[in-house]
């Protein structure tokens, strides 16, 4: 792994001859916000940046902080797309809308999350809210938007997918309790903790199956 200085130098030198399309899911706070702002800074705003989240005011404030290129004909654009990613029907409709209007995607960054160590909460679709954001939504975003990522890669452009979630802390996936339904119906607190820890392992497997195999092999 390169050291931090090498990474920073590589980022600073990034200057593609095309306008990259970058989507940040959960980009209105925390790591997602920082990554969107950093990407905008390194590209000097010459990118089509889409922040997807629930908080429009926060998203638009972040976008307002991005540098703006002087060339208004270059195709760059900065926009906010509203989506409560804990509801899969919302995720699917958002993906459909993006697929219908975007020619390609270069960078897909998934940061949306929710975690409660003491209790579990279900969404209107009957999914654990933590798993919905930390696994199910990310899976739907990746599988639905993969054709646009493949299109960018086939044209010779940079293509990356990043799912930010407690890297290096995955535990063995419990195949006898997928979705952690058994754990969540058991002792108070234990189900919530298991759900959080299992979601990391789910993500690791998802990135191999959904991304590494179809996109990079």
Image: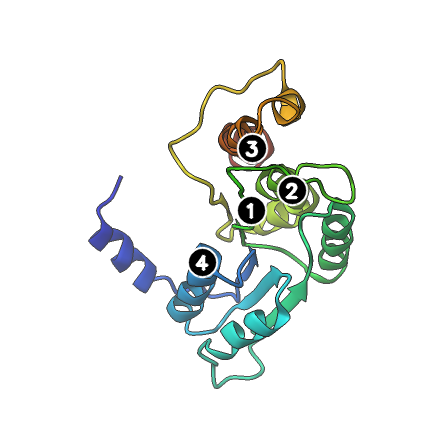
Task: Say if mark 1 contacts mark 2, CB within 8 Å.
Answer: yes
At label 2, counting other C-alpha atoms closer than 10 Å, the crowd grade (few under 14, some 14-19, many 20 or more) is many
Please tell me which of labels 4 and 3 falls first in the chain. Answer: 4
Residues at circles 4 and 2 in contact by the CB criterion of under 8 Å = no
The nearer-to-camera label among 3 and 1 is: 3
**Measured Cα–Cα span from mark 2 to mark 3:** 10 Å
Residue 114: assigned label: 1
In the image, residue 190 sits, relative to residue 27, either above or below, namely: above
104 or 110: nearer the eye?
A: 110
For residue 179, which quarter of the picture?
top right
Q: Report the residue marked by disc 2.
A: 129
Q: Report which residue position mark 4 lands on.
A: 30
- Numbered disc in front, either 1 or 4: 1
Place of residue 188 in the rendered image (x, y in percent of width and height, measured from the top left): 57, 29
Q: Name the residue under label 3.
A: 192
Q: Distance between the residues labelled 3 and 1?
A: 11 Å
């Amino acid at each position: 792994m390169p050291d931090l200085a090498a990474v920073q130098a590589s980022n600073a030198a990034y200057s593609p001859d095309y306008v990259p399309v970058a989507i940040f899911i959960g980009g209105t706070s925390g790591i997602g916000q920082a990554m969107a702002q950093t990407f905008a800074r390194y590209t000097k705003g010459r990118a089509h940046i889409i922040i997807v989240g629930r908080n429009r005011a926060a998203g638009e404030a972040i976008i307002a902080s991005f540098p703006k290129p002087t060339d208004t004909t270059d195709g760059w654009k900065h926009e906010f797309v509203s989506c409560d990613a804990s509801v899969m029907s919302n995720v699917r409709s958002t993906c459909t809308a993006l697929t219908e209007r975007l020619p390609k995607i270069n960078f897909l960054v998934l940061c949306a999350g929710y975690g409660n160590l003491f209790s579990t909460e279900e969404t209107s679709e009957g999914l654990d809210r933590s798993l919905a954001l930390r696994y199910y939504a990310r899976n739907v975003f990746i599988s639905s938007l993969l054709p646009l990522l493949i299109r960018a890669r086939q044209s010779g452009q940079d293509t990356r997918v990043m799912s930010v979630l407690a890297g290096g802390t995955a535990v063995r996936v419990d195949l006898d309790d997928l979705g952690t339904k058994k754990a969540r119906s058991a002792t108070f607190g234990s189900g919530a903790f298991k759900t959080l820890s299992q979601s990391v392992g789910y993500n690791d497997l998802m990135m191999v199956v959904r991304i590494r195999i179809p996109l990079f092999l």
